[in-house]
Amino acid sequence: MASAAAAAAAASFWLAEHPAIVGFRWSPTHLWFSTWAFLLGFLASYVALCLVLDAFLAAALRRRKPLPLGPVPAAHALLMAAVSAVIFAGTLLSAAAEIRDTRWSWRGRSRTTPFRWLLCFPPGTRSSGRVFFWSYAYYLSRYLHAARGVFAVLRRRRGASARVFAHAASVAMAFLWLEFSQSFQVLAILASTLAHAVAFGFRFWVGAGLPAARAARGAPVALACQLALLGCNLACHVGVVWMHFGAVGGGCSGIGAWVFNTLLNGALLWVFLHCYGKRGVCDDDGGATAARVTGSSNNKEL
């Protein structure tokens, strides 16, 4: 019991109480990848690289023969699962700590409650403190996640261009969350990192050929995670609209960025429907088959 309590205390310190986390502040001059110029330059370079690479492979390889990547996708999946799990734990502990430390200011002085704060930051909120530290960590992880788009191109997967667009949009949205202190990002990060930890853990399990992996290859784990994440995002967006226009006086922080975020989410929904509806399941890593989902043994799971 004592060792478990000590481990919990250590985790709480390193994930929510460390001075670097508590004193974090979003700054375009002191943090990596934090300027508009870098973001736009990366997005343009990333999309151009993938398009050029896809065109070259289409010209060089008459058939849609994938390039062998060996253990790289599985290793990347393991890394993404670990990073997502850490960000999920850090965001959860940090949100609980922020609610605990500011609860005194909500008693009798404001209509704000912990639930409303999770959906709707008060106007004037700055991107500083614990939850924004993990929002920054999540933003950095989007660059690592974008490698899946390159894998999709190299493995000649159907819908690779849609996958590349989805990863580029994900990077842009994470940047907007920090730049404009956008509301509801805490819940969005929790839902996204939990889904990624499960989905990428499953991809590594199957990709590495671990025991019982063959029996699990047809399980629609990634599809279930995608559906759960889309449902969570939809509920959060409805909640923000309700908070901003009625339930909370003064509105929510970063509502302009939220509108743009909503448009990007709509585009991502189109990507999802294109991948899972029109051509079966888009695949960026050659993972499990999705015959149970699509009814075709030739399509593979995301």
Image (cartoon, rainbow, N blue to C red):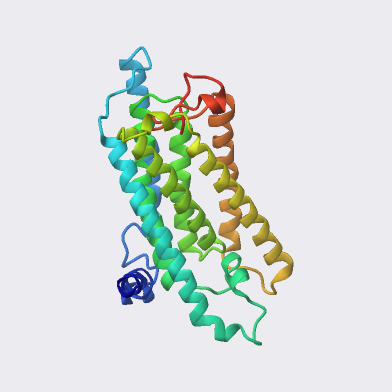
The picture quadrant where one finds residue 113 is bottom right
At a point 55% along the width and 82% down the height, the residue shown is 103
Task: Work out whether residue 184 can be spotted.
Answer: yes
Q: Quick one: 132 or 179, which is closer to the camera?
A: 132
At a point 44% along the width and 30% down the height, the residue shown is 283
Q: Residue furthest front?
A: 1
Query: Is residue 50 depicted above or below 61 in this figure?
Result: below
Query: Is residue 237 depicted above or below 15 in this figure?
Result: above
The picture quadrant where one finds residue 15 is bottom left
Q: Residue furthest top?
A: 62
**How many numbered discs?**
0
At a point 25% along the width and 30% down the height, the residue shown is 70
Residue 185 placement (x, y as % from top left):
52, 60
Residue 145 placement (x, y as % from top left):
37, 45
- Point out the image quarter for the N terminus: bottom left
Residue 176 placement (x, y as % from top left):
48, 57
Task: Work out whether residue 35 can be spotted.
Answer: no
Query: Is residue 113 depicted above or below 236 in this figure?
Result: below
Residue 205 placement (x, y as % from top left):
35, 38
The picture quadrant where one finds residue 35 is bottom left
